[in-house]
Image (spheres, rainbow, N blue to C red):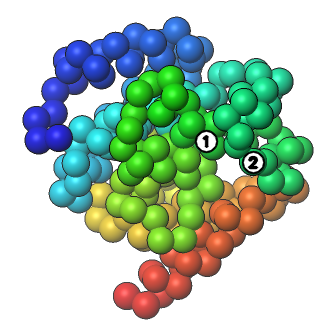
Amino acid sequence: MENFNTEDDYLKSLEKKLSKELDKKRFAHTIGVAYTAANLAMAHGDDIYDAYLAGLLHDNAKCISSSEKRRLCKKYNVSLNEAEEKNPDLLHAKLGAVLAKEIYGVEDNFIINAVRYHTTGRPGMTELEKIIYIADYIEPNRKILPDMSKIRKAAFRDLNEAMVLILQNTLGYLTDKKASIDQLTQETYDYYKNIAGNH
């Protein structure tokens, strides 16, 4: 979409709906991600509207209870891997992608996939997927994580560089916590580390 306007009727109705679905803190984070994604899209010559919309929708399933997440996954035939079976918190991205289409009326697969892969990433991500993944990590409401200022600077310079830094931190954090690591996250890190190493 050429013209971007935060007063757009569809965006406004979406924000209203999400403000009821999400708790206060999650909604503030969501708005932060939407604006950060729009800024990253501007910096990298991407579609601002798509970035803002995907940012708004990225956590749409976050505040749904675990049992309801499981029920909805069954309803929409969303297959779960071992890590997701153990930890339903991980389901919000996969489920959110389905709900973006079914509940929020998004037809665009680029936006749906940006919601789908915003927690794990994947090898060969689109620009929009990278923008949402990164915006989710660096938006202003986020607590300051290690290397945050370095990552924020990198994000506006080189999306792949920012991906490597974030994935490195994420894998380190999960390893320290002895939390289960989604195989896709590891594959994504290996993929982007390889790309960054070849520059």
Element type where label 2 sits in the image: loop
Q: Residue furthest left?
A: 3
Q: Residue furthest bottom?
A: 198
Q: At which x and y percent is residue 107?
A: 38, 38
**Residue position for label 1:** 93
**Residue position for label 2:** 79
Q: Residue at x 23, y 59 (%)?
A: 44
Q: At which x and y percent is residue 147?
A: 52, 58
Q: The disc labelled 1 sits on which kind of residue? A: Ala
Residue 36, picture quadrant: top left
The label nearer to you, 2 versus 1, is 2
Q: The disc labelled 2 sits on which kind of residue? A: Ser
Q: Nearer the viewer, residue 133 or 85?
A: 85
Element type where label 1 sits in the image: helix
Q: Residue at x 30, y 22 (%)?
A: 11
Q: At which x and y percent is residue 184?
A: 67, 64
Q: Nearer the viewer, residue 107 or 80?
A: 107
In this rendering, would 183 be left or right of 56? right
Q: Residue at x 63, y 28 (%)?
A: 62
